[in-house]
Image (cartoon, grey):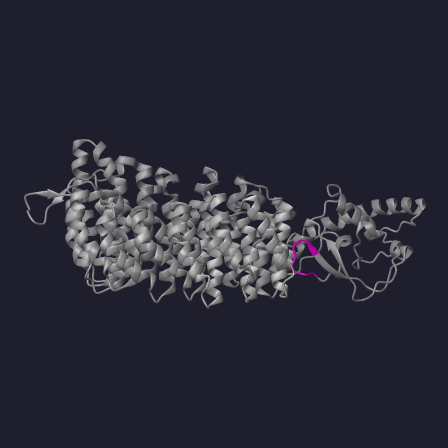
Amino acid sequence: MDIPAADEAMTTTMNIDMTSADTVVQETDETSMDVDDVENDDSSSPKPKLDDTETDSATTSSDTTKDSTANSNMETSSGEDSNSAPLTSVTPKVDASSNPKSNANIHHNNHPPVQPPVPQQELMVVSMVPEEEAQMLIEMLRADDVADRVAAAHRLTDVASAIGPERAREELLPFLSESVDDEDEVLIALAESVGQMVPFVGGNSHAHHLLSLLEMLLTSEESTVRDKAILSTNAIATVLPEGDFNAHYVEMISRLATKEWFTARMSSCNLLATSFPRLTVLKRASHVTLYANLCRDDAPMVRRVAAQNLSLLFRGVVSAYGLEALKDGGVVPSVIVPLYEELATNEQDSIRLHTSESCVTFGRETVPFVASASEEDREGMSIMLKERILPLLIATVDDRAWRVRWTAASKFAEALAAYEDFDGAVQALIPAYEKLLQDPEAEVRTAAVFNVAAVAQCKVYVPSLEESDQVCSIAERLIKCVTALTDDDSEHVRAALAAVATGLAPLLGKEDTISLLLPPLLLLLRDSASEVRLNLISTLSSLNEVIGVNLLSQSLLPAILDLAEDSKWRIRGVIIQHIPPLAKEFGQAFVSEKLAPLCVRLLEDDISSIRQAAASNLAELTSLFGADWAAAHLLPPIEKVLKDPSYLRRLTAIQACAAIASVMDTDAASRIVLPLILDCAQDYVPNIRFNVAKALSVVAPKCTRAACADIISTLQTLVEDSDRDVRYFAKQSLDSLQSDKVRH
């Protein structure tokens, strides 16, 4: 439909550049208009709009008086035209009295000054007032280009702000409702914007006007559109007054839950669950019935979403009713738990997939009530948990679908934490967890292994596997499974185990860690897969806090050496990052003998990023053990690298020297490191010489006055170098030193 302008005087012929929301590019005609012709022209043809800066300075005072009179007449007729404009159009109104700029534009539109001819191709930048921008966005909503419609849909709040709340409710929203049959990208943007429009349609008291548009979006076939619409709907529901909430929002949910098309029923699942605490007492029973019908819907997609949001509904029910909901005959045992049981045994894997999450939520909400309930109520809730809920959770371990078992494995630590305070729950769950650690599918075992340390943190004691009449900690019981997993066929399982196994050490204590955990860790250190060894080395800090790493030193060093020479350069890069933390744990003597040569040797790696990491690593070791240690154990082998035939390795050695000097004291940097860098200033490769210039600018602030003079002398020599790159970096370093006025 056409959207006529609210004021003919504001209409303009412009070619709009959609790449900017603040400016437009306008082509002007070569022809100019005579002032008298404009004054006598009563036609409704569009008149060109001019900026205030285009007013002819030669306009006389009589012309100004005439302009003022004509302006007054124009405003009167303009108001009549605006009142007669169709209400179905969504056009920004121009309030000349409240917008000084608009008033000025109207004045010049009726009395344009004489302009000189403008070349046909000349482009002018015209600032857009909000009304014009809103009109542009509305036109973009009807454009053929999808990108334009998406951009306009993202800026609906600008349109609503320009036209005002009343017209936004009466004209913009109906206009948008007619546009819901559009591309998914447009509808996604529309669904996001509608949730932000409450302040622009009149505030909370008028927010319910947005629900009719959202109701259409909630029935979209595209799930992303529905998800965005659900977020916006929930956001609007939070600001609705109670009267509007019950009169409009609740009725909309009821319609969605009973619509014939399944997408509407899918959307209603989340809305029913989130709105439950605000429902009136009379509405709660009917909405629980609606949700129960959705859980038993003929469409599997609806049942899946209902199962996914059942935990949300359960929290809402408990929040609304409190302990009364959990008592015998309450909503939970009579309605909610049967839904749990039906969905947990559904034939669709995608529906059973949510059983673990639902049981975890049930435990989190119910177990705290068990402790505070009366003895009679406590007994009823305990029976419900032991005989109806926990069996559902344990049954997921033996489910025929590996995805259901994987979900149970990934959620098991949360389940244990939820039922930890419920008597007998942990003892029933741990055997199920051990089954997951031995599952036939590697993906399930991997998910279960990642939870080993979290599961072991449970403080409840369980029966020992060796002697059934004795109890032990969960960590002690799981050690047998951990040891068996070190020989697992899947590299991913072993890598996951290496990443979390050391987390058991604080739980076991020093003696049990040495006797029970250390043997499987040593096996992992000798694993054939580099990722397994790397994961274990990355987590040695927790082991060091319990027993120290001295017991692992003999096995750890070969693993580090192997990883430093791994064929995958990313593995070599990661092990370099772990050398400084390991150096703190092993101590100076071990590093001097075993790791220092390795760290320097990595400067000769074939990969540039590894060489750079090795240079930074040497600086960290120098900072850790001091300048004298670096002079004794790092600089002699670095000096050999400075004479390597490969200029790339010499270059890295220079960078390493600069990094080491930056963490030394003034005397050590000047006496030990600077001579090595200055010796390279005469290298035959220009890349080496200009990297010397760059290194000197780094080292200079750490050197003595005499050494600084040598640096400046060397840079002055390099400024005269035959290579222009060397001259450039030398001059840059020299200027930097002189501008900073380095003082010693």
Name the side, left or right, on which 734 lies relative to 364.
Answer: right
Residue 261 visible here: no
Magenta region includes residue 592: no
Q: Quadrant of the C terminus?
A: top right
The x and y percentages for residue 624 are: 38, 45
Is residue 658 toward the left or the right of residue 43 in the image?
A: left
Residue 665 vs 305, above or below: the answer is above
Give x and y (percent) for residue 306: 33, 53
Give the left or right position of residue 276, taking residue 680 as reference: left
Q: Is residue 19 magenta?
A: yes
517 lies above or below 723: above
Instruction: Please tell me in which quadrant of the rendered image residue 520 appears.
Output: bottom left
**How far across and down, in percent of the image, does residue 664 sit?**
46, 46
Q: Name the one closer to the observer, 711 or 16.
A: 711
Locate the N terminus and report the quarter of the image it occupies.
Answer: bottom right
The magenta span reads 16-23
Which x, y percent locates residue 483?
17, 55
